[in-house]
Image (spheres, coloured by chain):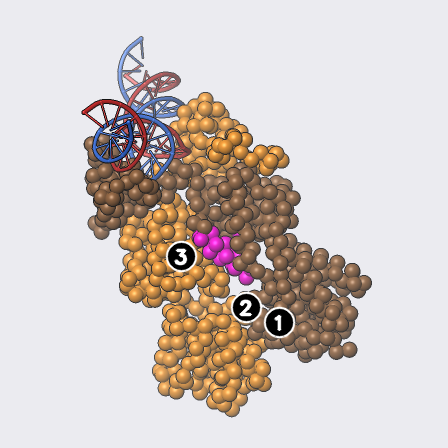
Chain colours: A brown, B orange, C blue, D red
DNA sequence: GACGACCTTGTTTACGTAAACATTATCCTT
DNA sequence: AAGGATAATGTTTACGTAAACAAGGTCGTC
């Protein structure tokens, strides 16, 4: 209790000056964080005892514990996680690097990650990359390295990573989503190929001679995988493979593709690489007077909630974003707990086909 | 900070064997962290000199600086933000509490917040609340208090907060989005009332006798404001006010509302409280053979990217989510820098009407 | 040539927490 | 009742960083 060391005298005027312009605002001296030492002083115990109470250790007698708790309440004590992190060397925080939060899939995945991480006692730190240049990606990793995170989940078109010049800092636990870097990192992803196969097979089974395809942006690994599976599936069935049309995920690009497809007399079935582009297709076909599904069948990918209210309601491939998020968190937590890097490999989350009203047998 | 940050050059580290290497210390914890002391030892200087180099302070002679930088590179030094935070008393992190990340508006807002915060050197820590009970909200604030965040942005239906039992911990810088707590907190929000007025006036100006309305969930403040403004606008124009229909933001609920409205012979114009529900309306009217906009005009709210590809393309109220996010960050940063609590008040971000093809003069 | 101004680098210290170790109080056993 | 085991609490220290202060060195000026 003889805390008459110089530290005790600081509360009066905390080194007025320096750069940070805080300090004596009449309204609040609250910027002074309450530390364990403050609680200890009020409770008449050592700060170590406060620590024990705070962490629920046994070996603190009831009366003492009560005093400490009372002092905590009175002062409004909150543990300082910076000090805690410094002490323990970990932060209970997972960093998430991603390119585009506003996209349907990513926001769902992030939400699932955040929710599941929360149940495990981890918080999420978000670092967005506005433009996916190598510099920006590198900068994000640098920031993550400096930031207090125990692990990193990367959600993005990962070609940049694969280029080799951009590597994750060694010693950082990492799980990657939407990537083919499975040979080097632990990867979690929707089973894009299976999903695309489901879509194509569904259309072929309905009797369509072949299936046209509208891709996502070339830089997208997911788009590539879907396109690849589409092609393979057609080839396996011995069907002709029409030249794919290229979109950029937006409904607008789907509309443009749709206008082109509407002029193809042979085209009776289209598989769009996501639901937004499928929406564009529907509008284009509507504008050109081609009826869906009577004249042309359309299948999307993602199963966004709106898809059920498209005109007509869209047949699409359902992605389980929540499961992807969960497995990401599980993956990094396992790495953290085991202390090693994640074993490379790809963990595929299954998809399922949701049949609605945009598909039907061809009319001839 | 410095663009010539040595840390950026380190990725050349051989990753090859890293993954097998686990922790080479048997049973020991991974503690690989390179500290300033390590760098100092290698460079043959004091750790303070390393600190000066790392922070770009002047007063370090060229040769010494070079030695230090070389040592940093060799060891792969990264500053430890926990220690930094402990030292400075701040983390350069903004906490974001939100209820539903996957909703269109929120994900855009969060992305804008994260992006803008990044340019200011702040990272974002996300705490989602899966079910908005008072307990969960309180828990989130507690977690935030323990996490070392410098400020908090709250994005949610904020009625719970207003209930009084849930209050933000005093002394935390906070900005609230989508709330009417402007008398107590600093609030940033889209100008819901103006947006709704734009929508209603547009329809009245086209010649519609009155405008029907599909609301969002009752718990949503934004929905309430839009409904309120809709009602007021009609009353001011001396028009009759039809009973509003209640949705829950989902396209499905809009569809249900649309089926009901399709049977109202007087109904020639509908204002939906968001674009998703407007989509549901479009489908319902299509299913019932009521042509949009010939028979019924529809206006939405949000201007999601897909709205331009609805059938027909949707007239809607554009929200500037990026601006909302920017002002949130500006608000908390100002509080952090000035050290005070934010001045209560509401900062409204303007909207604008985007006229597309879902509105037209009434046919009779 | 001596003194001081200035420039560069080193040393001490504090930030808040908690493990490791040290000390005192308490109770049980023989 | 002495001895020792055990329980309760206190003291020291380290975590990584950087401000404050101290010390050594260089140079210019008179």
The reply, left or right, for residue B264 in relation to residue A348 is left
Q: Label 1 vs label 3: CA separation?
A: 34 Å
The answer to whether the residues at label 3 and label 2 have Cβ atoms under 8 Å apart is no
Q: Residues within 10 Å of mark 1 (few under 14, many from 20)?
A: many
From the viewer's side, name the closer residue of B53 and A329. Answer: A329
Q: Magenta residues: mostly which secondary structure?
A: helix
The reply, left or right, for residue A356 in relation to residue B346 is right
The answer to whether the residues at label 1 and label 3 have Cβ atoms under 8 Å apart is no
Q: Are marks 3 and 2 on the same chain?
A: no
The x, y position of residue B326, in whole percent, is: 42, 57
Residue tagged by mark 1? A314
Q: Are marks 2 and 1 on the same chain?
A: yes
Q: Is residue B32 visible?
A: no
Please tell me whether residue B314 belongs to the stretch shown in magenta.
no
Q: Is label 3 in a helix, a strand or a loop?
A: strand
Q: Is label 1 in a helix, a strand or a loop?
A: loop
Q: Label 2 vs label 1: CA separation?
A: 10 Å
The answer to whether the residues at label 2 and label 1 have Cβ atoms under 8 Å apart is no
The x, y position of residue B263, in whole percent, is: 51, 87
The x, y position of residue A214, in whole percent, is: 68, 64
Q: Quadrant of the N terminus of chain A?
A: top left
Q: Chain of mark 2?
A: A
The x, y position of residue A12, in whole percent, is: 20, 39
Residue tagged by mark 2? A305
Residue tagged by mark 3? B97
- Above or below, B277 against B176 in this view is below
Image-quadrant location for residue A285:
bottom right
Q: What residue span does the magenta drawing correspond to?
A: A98-119
Mark before the other along the chain sequence, 2 or 1: 2
Q: Are marks 1 and 3 on the same chain?
A: no
């Amino acid at each position: 209790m003889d805390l008459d060391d110089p530290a005790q005298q600081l509360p009066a005027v905390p080194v007025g000056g320096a750069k940070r312009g805080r300090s004596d605002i009449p309204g609040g001296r609250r910027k002074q964080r309450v530390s364990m030492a403050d609680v200890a002083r009020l409770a008449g115990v050592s700060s170590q005892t406060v620590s024990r109470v705070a962490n629920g250790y046994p070996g603190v007698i009831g009366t003492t514990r009560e005093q400490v708790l009372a002092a905590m309440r009175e002062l409004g004590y909150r543990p300082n996680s910076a000090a805690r992190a410094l002490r323990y060397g970990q932060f209970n925080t997972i960093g998430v690097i991603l390119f585009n939060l506003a996209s349907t899939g990513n926001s769902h995945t992030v939400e699932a990650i955040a929710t599941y991480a929360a149940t495990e006692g981890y918080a999420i730190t978000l670092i967005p990359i506005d433009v996916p240049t190598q510099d920006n990606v590198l900068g994000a990793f640098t920031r993550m390295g400096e930031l207090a995170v125990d692990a990193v989940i990367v959600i993005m078109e990962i070609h940049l990573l694969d280029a080799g010049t951009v590597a994750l800092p060694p010693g950082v636990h990492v799980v990657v989503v939407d990537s083919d870097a499975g040979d080097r990192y632990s990867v979690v992803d929707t089973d894009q190929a299976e999903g695309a196969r489901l879509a194509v097979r569904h259309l072929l089974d309905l009797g369509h001679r072949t299936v046209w395809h509208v891709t996502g942006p070339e830089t997208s690994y997911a788009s590539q995988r879907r396109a690849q599976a589409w092609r393979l599936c057609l080839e396996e069935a011995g069907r002709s493979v029409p030249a794919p049309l290229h979109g950029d995920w937006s409904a607008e690009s789907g509309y443009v593709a749709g206008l082109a497809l509407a002029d193809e007399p042979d085209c009776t079935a289209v598989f769009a690489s996501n639901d937004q582009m499928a929406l564009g297709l529907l509008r284009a076909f509507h504008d050109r007077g081609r009826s869906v599904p009577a004249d042309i069948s359309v299948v999307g990918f993602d199963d966004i909630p709106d898809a059920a209210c498209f005109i007509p309601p869209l047949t699409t491939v359902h992605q389980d974003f929540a499961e992807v998020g969960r497995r990401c968190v599980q993956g990094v937590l396992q790495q953290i707990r085991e202390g090693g890097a994640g074993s490379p490999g790809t963990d595929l989350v299954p998809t399922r086909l949701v049949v609605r009203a945009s598909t039907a047998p061809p009319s001839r």
